[in-house]
Amino acid sequence: MIADSRLKTLLLVVTVLTLSACGGGGGSDNGGGGGTPTNRAPTANAGAAQSVNEFDAVTLDGSASSDPDAGTTLTYSWTQTLGANVTLSGASTAAPTFDAPDVTALNTPAVLRFQLTVSDGSLSSSATVDITVNDAGLGINSPPTAAAGPDQNVAESSNVDLDGSGSSDPDGDMLSYSWIQTGGQNVTLTGANTAQPSFTSPNVAAGSPETLTFELTVDDGADNATDSVDIVVAEAQSMVSVSGRLFYELPTANLLCRGYDFNNLTNKPVRRATVQLLDAANTVLATGETGDDGSYSFAGINANTDVRVRVTAEMVRTSGAQTWEVYVRDNTSNTAVPFGQRPIYEVQWGLFNTGTTDVIDQDFVAATGWGGAGYTGARAAAPLSILDAIADAIILIQSADANVDMGRLDAYWSVNNTLNGERDWSAGELSATFFVSSPDLGVSGPAIFLLGDAVGRLPESTIDTDEFDRGVLQHEWGHYFEHWFSRSDSIGGRHFVPGTVEPRLAFGEGWGYAISAIIGGDPLLCDTFSPATSGFQLDIENEDRGTQGFFNEMSVATLIYDLYDTSIDGTDIDSIGFAPIYETMTGFQKDVDSFTTVFSFAEGLLANVDPADIAFVNSQLSRESVDTGDVNRWATGQTTQPALWTNGKPVRDILPVYTELTPGGASVNVCVNDDQVIDQDGNKPGEWRYFRFTTSSQQTWTITAAANPVPPPTSDTDPMVDDRSDPDLFVFRNGAWLTSTLGRSPDDDVETISNLSLSADTYTIAFQDWRYEDPQKASDYPSQVCFDVSIN
């Protein structure tokens, strides 16, 4: 009934509109019915476009103009709207005439535009026509213009080039050149009849510059023009070189990393950084790059000149077989621009005079700024320490790959970067030191944000500085490695040592710890808090607290580091070096069709190592409770699991690591639990289950997860409390997310992905009951829920 009413209304509107369009007077436009005829406008036609030569007689033609009303006499009016002005004869006739103007080769063809307006006495109409005038070489010669080039200041006994190539001829005529000297000490011109002659400047007296004047004449064969240029010759400036080394202060960690001892400093070289020499006005005189020993050198610098050295916290090499870009920026400065354009830190020292002989051993040190009980000066060493820690990583990659693009990485540090759990990075409010693939939605690219607040600048802040915590920074660089060189399927979230997490996160964090120890050449990782008093130490090689296994990030870290290092430690009696680890991470692990876990890493590594090292690799896997009978990405050979977690709860729902689904087959029942959940972090073992399936052809599928048995009702009556299961499915191919059910279904205890078109390939599913991550779940929600999962 509603649809019918709307239709009726629409028909009524159409009827009214139709009646309105008819009018009410009975008149028409054809004079019928005895009314007065309506005048109609004429149509102007300015004729066809023409192409003529200069000086040609040209006739315009508007005779094709017309009027639809019979017997109407038209009047004509022509005006010129574009081009060199001409005189129209008969501008009020249908066919006026004019003589085409003289044009030159440089502005030919020239376009003249004329507008015709025709009128029937009441109404009018206009049209335009273009007349193109070509140069025929019949015009009056236009003289050339001579340009002898800018005045120059040169040193004595130097080669000087004059430049008359800016001379021109408006007609496009060929020019001849003739240079003569009209002032100053005579010199011999080479190529005096060319556009660009040269000469050797003469010797002049000290302190008495001399001006040489040269006159250029250019000729187009009919006319000529002249111009002059002054060359000021002065005694050659004495030159010297400036060299030295740049360092930054690095404090020594206290026992167990309880802060740093700022009375025990090491001067570390500033490596591979951009270094510049500036004059007193801060004009850049020379630019270079520091060596791996912090050395710098500038040649050809004016003697007796006040200069200073400035180093920029960046490493940039964009050409060659191995390339990289690293910048250390202040994320809290100039926040109006994107992160990738924020200021790069610079350190510069005081002026010194170059004197008259080469300057050597001009060394400088960037200080920490520590004043005894706290920071009292500029923290100049901080950005250079950050840069240097990343230099270690670059050097490691260089040793493993002769042809590699290491990409661009921005490191953001500020004295304002405080630990307060917030996420306003421009204000310096951070939740930790962390890596992010793109801080502003792809504009700036991958970045590491580092804590730097040494005073607790906000009431809710925790004091924590990481600029000297090289292991922390290099751990985050390990995540950059995964992002740029390899792949990470880690879901992130809070994690602790000791502790257990789901396998993807365990591998990602374990890799970060291991690569930091490899980069730094030290398994002891320091993470200080208050700069001089607090922090903790982590032993990557010997950390064995908690339950060991594929769900423990430190098991992964110890495994990878022990494979690399040469120290003898129990069954760690050998070393495979970094090369096979690098090859695995940049090859097999990057492209694997499973999730990235210790199992995929182990399969790829065993294929890359020398056969003689396989037994050693297996021994290290076994030490971390990874079964070695059938090592593969799907962990089908993993049958070992601990009996109890450290909290005393029995271990359940972690094997098999992957459950295989058969497309079109029966559902599979799997369970998830919150046995290890702390504060709903959503990343603990048992919270996530993995599936894999393979399709043989392009088809459309439906994936369903339904609670079985359905969880019983909870005792909570508050409607804001969530008491039903909320399954979530995340579908991937080779680590790339395809789709998910996050927030899809309004129904309790079931989730479905429908109309999922998949080509022939192998796919993975990560599955969870989001209720275990939900801060509003019922207090007596079951600790384990099971689901039937199927694909049809």
Image (tube, rainbow, N blue to C red):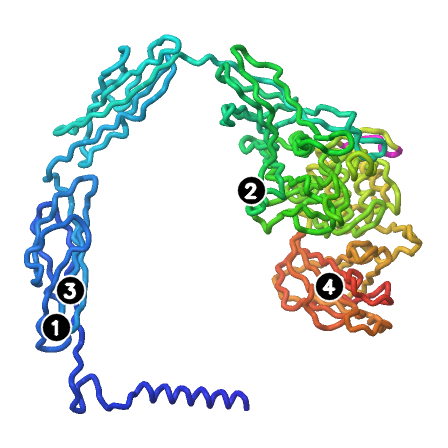
Examine the image and state in which quarter residue 103 appears.
Answer: top left
Dominant SS in magenta: loop
User: Badge 1: few (under 14), some or many (20 or more) residues near its Cα, within 10 Å?
Assistant: few
Quickly name the residue at label 4. Answer: 728
Marks 2,3: beta carbons within 8 A: no
| Helix, strand or loop for disc 2 | helix
Residue at the spot 73% in from the left edge and 28% down from the top edge? 250
Cα gap from disc 1 to disc 2, whole angstroms: 67 Å
Which range is magenta?
570-576
Which marked residue is nearer to the observer: mark 3 or mark 1?
1
Of residue 476 and residue 279, the one placed in the foreground of this image is 279
Examine the image and state in which quarter residue 672 appears.
Answer: bottom right
Of residue 293 and residue 321, the one placed in the foreground of this image is 293
The amino acid at mark 4 is Asp
The amino acid at mark 2 is Gln
Q: Is residue 321 above or below residue 746?
A: above
User: Badge 3: few (under 14), some or many (20 or more) residues near its Cα, within 10 Å?
Assistant: many
| Helix, strand or loop for disc 4 | strand
Quickly name the residue at label 1. Answer: 121
| Helix, strand or loop for disc 3 | strand
Residue 77 rendering spot, x and y as whole percentages:
12, 63
Of residue 428 and residue 118, the one placed in the foreground of this image is 428
Examine the image and state in which quarter residue 716 appears.
Answer: bottom right
Residue 270 rendering spot, x and y as whole percentages:
65, 26
Cα gap from disc 2 to disc 3, whole angstroms: 58 Å
The amino acid at mark 1 is Gly
Question: Looking at the rendering, in which quadrant would you find the C terminus?
Answer: bottom right
Quickly name the residue at label 2. Answer: 341
